[in-house]
Amino acid sequence: MKIDLRKSAFLKFLVVGGFGTIINISFYTIFVKYGIHFIVASLLAFVIAVTSNYYFNSIWTFKNRAVHKTKLKKYFEFISISGLNLLTNLIILSISLWILNKNMSFGEFLSNNLSFLLEGDAVFYNKIISQVIGIGFATILNYLGNKFITFKEDPQNTFIKP
């Protein structure tokens, strides 16, 4: 089965989301590295990444959808849905970090083996891993919310082909 990336909204959403994840993790890592509290770092990285994601999803993923809505309304809905998913991310981030910090072996393993890429202790790596886990959980909820709310097709412009 051949999947055409140009036609699959979900795959486009994943590509945009992957780019957003790179932006999120990059800024989060920089903020944490410079001593910003991990929750504040996550919030700042979220705002930067979600703005990028809105832009690329509106011009590529859901390009011809929700044309009946203003850009401001779509942006507000996108931010609102993303905000709910941020809460999901922060909850999962906090739980994951608590679990990983109780057993430092994974963070220590990364610290010992990845220090040539990015210097940090086990707690630092646990924060990065926890952020990745939180983003993963929020991705599906984010896609569904934006497909069916923000970029919902106008029912007047939708028809069923016989």
Image (cartoon, rainbow, N blue to C red):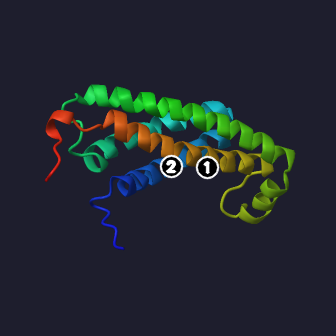
Q: Inspect the image, locate mark 2, and give the three-letter code of the amino acid beneath it.
A: Thr
x then y, percent, for residue 156: 15, 34
Q: Which mark is residue 21?
A: 2
Q: Is there CB contact under 8 Å for labels 2 and 1? A: yes
Circle 2 residues within 10 Å: few <14, some 14–19, many ≥20: many
Residue 129 lies left or right of residue 107; in this view the side is left
Which residue is located at x 75 percent, y 60 percent? 110
Q: Earlier in the sequence, mark 2 or mark 1?
A: 2
Instruction: Residue 39: name its quadrant.
Output: top right
Q: Secondary structure at mark 2?
A: helix
x then y, percent, for residue 96: 72, 43
x then y, percent, for residue 26: 55, 48
| Residue 1 versus residue 19 in the image, above or below | below
x then y, percent, for residue 107: 78, 54
Residue 36 lies left or right of residue 6; in this view the side is right
Which residue is located at x 68 percent, y 46 percent? 130
Q: Secondary structure at mark 1?
A: helix
Circle 1 residues within 10 Å: few <14, some 14–19, many ≥20: some
Instruction: Say which quadrant the N terminus sits in.
Output: bottom left
Q: Which mark is residue 150?
A: none
Instruction: Residue 55: name its quadrant.
Output: top left
| Residue 7 versus residue 51 in the image, above or below | below
Residue closest to the eye, 28 or 18: 18
Which residue lies under the disc numbered 1?
Answer: 132
Residue 67 visible from this viewpoint: no
Residue closest to the eye, 88 or 46: 88
Residue 116 visible from this viewpoint: yes
